[in-house]
Amino acid sequence: MPDSIDKRILKVEFGLEALRVKERDSDERKVTENVFDNATLKTLYHLSNSGYIEALGGPISTGKEANVFYAIGKGDRELAVKIYRISSSNFKAILGYIVGDHRFENVKRTKRDLIFAWARKEFQNLLRARNVGVRVPEPIIVERNVLVMEFIGEDGIASPHLRDVKLVREDGEKIFEEMIEFMRRLYQDAGMVHGDLSEYNILIGPENEPVIIDMGQGVLISHYRSREFLERDIENVVGFFRRYGVKATKREVLRRITDNNQYNNRWMRKIG
């Protein structure tokens, strides 16, 4: 990389001028300092130079392993740019979702390689989900530890999480049914489970449309922990929607999602 580009990248560390980032306050500056290491800045510059990102804005959310930023792409399309933190991510937590997935069995167990695999994994899981009609953000490109995808929201305002939305009972029941259908499609048609599904990673879009996010934890049903993850997903979803009068049991939901496939009677009795 020429020296002139190197110098430009270094300037990006605080102003992100190569990507025309607009930092609105000191808190956002702190976020950029924690996320934008030199390698990540170079990746963002590459994506900008390739036309995927025309302008990068402030943070949308901060998660355990990644930060999501608002961006503008080709044709003024609104985007979300997810940057997986290399230096501060939980190595052991990520390893638990990568090991056992045959798609990534040759990945080296270094932190850097696992983070890159994690980004590719979310990209592939999003594609897999969309292909069977599950509403998730459209993935656009993944490069190293950066995932560019559809922005869920309008005019720079992100759609709220399910946990932050007050619904009338009828809408709650409707969204519950939609979520069970999404889980069924993931399991039956895509051969996977989300792995960390709850009101914290479901967005409510226009007209109360549920959108599932954070697909990086998703595993194939062949994964040795898929049963455990599915049980947890069901418990989280059923538990949340009880506030809207949903009376379905975990056992009933499990039957609807799996048609009882791969689940013996002993385990069915276990989850009630």
Image (tube, rainbow, N blue to C red):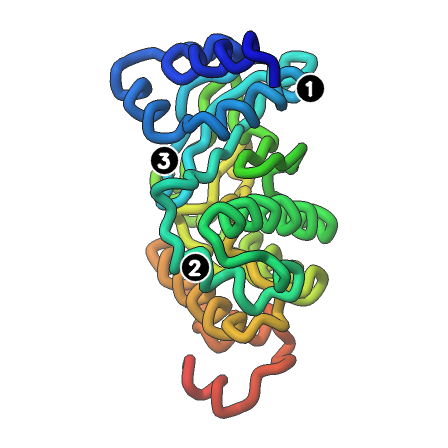
Q: Position of residue 176 (x, y in %)?
A: 49, 55
Does residue 88 appear to the left or right of 219 in the view shown? left
Question: Which-is-in-front pick, marks 3 and 2?
Answer: 3
Report, in whole angstroms, how far the alpha carbon at label 1 lies from the one at label 2: 40 Å
Residue in the image at 50% along x and 58% along y: 109
Disc 2, SS:
helix
Residue in the image at 55% along x and 8% along y: 4
Q: Residues within 10 Å of mark 1 (few under 14, many from 20)?
A: few
> In this figure, which residue is indicated by the disc labeled 3?
62
User: In the rendered structure, which amino acid carries the disc numbered 1?
Assistant: Ser
Of residues 149 and 11, the one nearer the viewer is 11
Image quarter (top left, top right, bottom left or bottom right) of the C terminus = bottom left
Vertical comparison of 59 with 143: above or below: above
Query: Counting residues from the N terminus, which is met first, the one under dot 1 or under dot 2?
Result: 1
Does residue 102 appear to the left or right of 174 in the view shown? right
Vertical comparison of 89 with 82: above or below: below
Residue 212 in sight from this viewpoint: no
Q: Position of residue 189 (x, y in %)?
A: 72, 62
Report, in whole angstroms, how far the alpha carbon at label 3 lies from the one at label 2: 22 Å
> Residue 14 bears which disc, if any?
none
Question: Which-is-in-front pick, marks 1 and 2?
Answer: 1
User: In the rendered structure, which amino acid carries the disc numbered 2?
Assistant: Val
> In this figure, which residue is indicated by the disc labeled 2?
237
Query: Counting residues from the N terminus, which is met first, the one under dot 3 or under dot 1?
Result: 1
User: In the rendered structure, which amino acid carries the disc numbered 3?
Assistant: Thr
Q: Toward which corner of the image does residue 93 lie, by quadrant?
A: bottom left
Q: Toward which corner of the image does residue 26 lie, by quadrant?
A: top left
> In this figure, which residue is indicated by the disc labeled 1?
50
Residue in the image at 55% along x and 45% along y: 116
Vertical comparison of 145 with 71: above or below: below
